[in-house]
Image: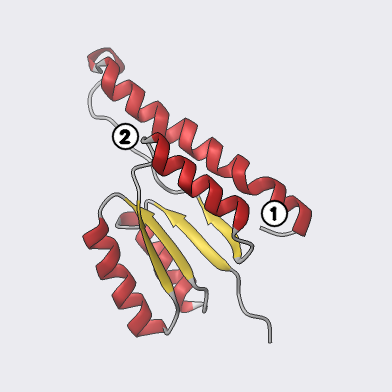
Amino acid sequence: MTTPSTVLITGASSGIGAVYAERFARRGHNLVVVARDKARLDDLAARLREENGVAVEVIQADLTQAADLTALETRLREDASIGVLINNAGIAQSGGFAQQNVESIDKLVALNIIALTRLAAAVAPRFAQSGSG
């Protein structure tokens, strides 16, 4: 029997990201969960390990920060066990566009566009070469 690939999930500490983690863990996938809130990730990881018997690695990262984003890109390029990327991290802003300040727009673009695209670009060549992912 083949071992399911490891799944890396960004924005995994709550909401849709946590649900993805739960569902993949139930299917026997080991996980790498990524988010800013380490305490929430640790709680989720402990529960998933106990309930499903899978390995769960926690990575605390703010994907709007260059060093954190670069480290995750490197991991995706080099870790052949990761066969699925759930690029879930993202933010929304309240209010209309005209009410947004430059800093909030920069953060939204950094997370929702730049980080998402760079992570996908980091892993895509490896997925294409392997014919999966």
Disc 2 residue type? Ala
Residue 130 sits in which quadrant?
bottom right
Depth check, front residue: 51 or 60: 60
Q: Which of the 4 quarters of the picture holds residue 17?
A: bottom left
Left or right, residue 7 beside residue 16: right
Q: Secondary structure at mark 1?
A: helix
Which quarter of the figure is the N terminus placed in? bottom right
Residue nearer the viewer, 23 or 74: 74
Could you classify mark 1 by the number of other residues whose Cα lies within 10 Å: few (under 14), some (14-19), or many (20 or more)?
some
- Please tell me which residue is depicted at 36% across the width and 76% down the height of the picture: 48
- SS state under label 2: loop
Q: Residue furthest bottom?
A: 1
Q: Which residue is mark 1?
A: 127
Tell me where residue 33 appears, x and y as whole percent. 40, 61
Residue depicted at x 23% and y 24%: 95
- Image point (46%, 78%), residue name: 26
Neighbor class of circle 2 (other Cα within 10 Å; few <14, some 14-19, many 20+) is few
Where does label 2 land, which residue? 92
Q: Judge whether 95 appears above or below 47 on screen.
A: above
